Amino acid sequence: MRPHPASVTRRTLLTGVAAAALAACRPRHRLAAPLPDPDTAALTAAAESERVLISAYDALTVTAAPGADTAATAMALAGHRAHLIALEALLATPTSSPTGPPPLAAPDQLTAAVRASVAKLQKAAMSAADGRSAALLASIAAWHAASTAATRLRIGP
Amino acid sequence: MTTVAALQAALGVEHEVIYGYGVVGAHLSGRLRARCLRRLDEHSARRDQLALLVRRAGAIPVAARPAYALPYPVADVTSAARLAARLEDAVAGAAWDLVTASGPATAPRRLGVSTLEAAATAAGGWRVLVPGTTDPALPGQPG
């Protein structure tokens, strides 16, 4: 897709040299300024949720029955770990590990938990004072929504 | 980036995506074509919302070009789905920027948040048809 240069933005669909040059101009939203306190609370809560999900998916991996969809579990784990890393990078501090063993959860219960997190994350994104926090929370919500939609496609009608 | 600039950039992407989905749809049939047409309707609605927000901000919405060059030839279902996923990824990127540039509890922030979800979900649906592709863990994230 190649619009007139005057309308080129970092998000256009150009390929090749122009896109690479534009990508190099993209800002990096990393720790340019301290986050407002309410954002820190929201990001910390999101990180704790990701830790719980990671623990639960880890447990699921260990207890997986023969023939279980291990690829889907691995993909979910990779996604939630990436979310935790991004949240901790923005917070600039590691969050604490959840205490106690992870709750036992069947795959469909975990999927339901991820789906239920979407509205909470989006609400936090809506109210975040800092745009960096808002975008990260909204993006994690989007991945949670997309991943559960994909699960529904696989197992549902 | 100002909110208006982010809105204009997102609007420019929607113009491209609407054009691109026209190409995608020409190579699909049945349920996939219906899915493509649904997304086309949704993107058209989002384009109109973005244009409205640009006008409310006192600016003139960027116009669509008569045509856009495709990044690669689209000749079958797989290449059409790959283009559709690419289009949705671009929308997610513009939405990330819009969320970043907008203030809390504003209409642009709301539109950016909902667009991120819709684009990530749609991109994932198209990627199912393209072997060897995976969804990014953070849809729309720069870099």
Image: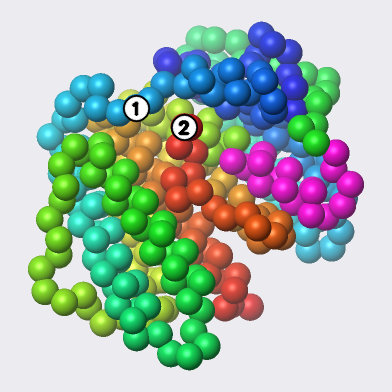
Q: Which mark is residue A20?
A: none
- The answer to whether mark 2 and mark 1 are in CB contact below 8 A is yes
Q: Which residue is mark 1?
A: A29
Label 1 environment density (alpha carbons within 10 Å; few <14, some 14–19, many ≥20): some
Q: Tag 1's secondary structure? A: loop
Share a chain, discs 2 and 1? no
Q: Is residue A26 above or below residue B131?
A: above
Can residue A17 be seen from the camera position used here?
Answer: yes
Q: What residue is rendered at 76% in x and 41% in y?
A: B21
Amino acid carrying mark 1 in the image: His
Q: Residue at x 53, y 39 (%)?
A: B92
Query: Which element is circle 2 on?
Result: loop
Residue A25: image location, x then y, percent: 49, 17
Question: Which disc, if any, is residue B142?
Answer: 2
> Which of B87 and B46 lies nearest the eye of the viewer?
B87
Q: Reply yes or no: does residue B15 show up in magenta.
A: no
Tag 1 subunit: A
Image coords of residue B108 (percent x, y): 44, 29
Gap between marks 2 and 1 measured at Cα: 9 Å
Amino acid on which the number 2 mark rests in the picture = Pro
Q: Is residue A73 above or below residue B136?
A: below
Where, by quadrant of the figure, is residue B96 drawn? Answer: top left
Magenta stretch, residue numbers? B73-89
Query: Residue at 59% of width from left, 74% of height from top?
Result: A154
**Is any part of residue B62 visible from this angle?**
no
Magenta-drawn stretch contains B75: yes
- Determine the main secondary structure of the stretch shown in magenta: helix
Picture coordinates of residue A132, whole percent (x, y): 32, 31
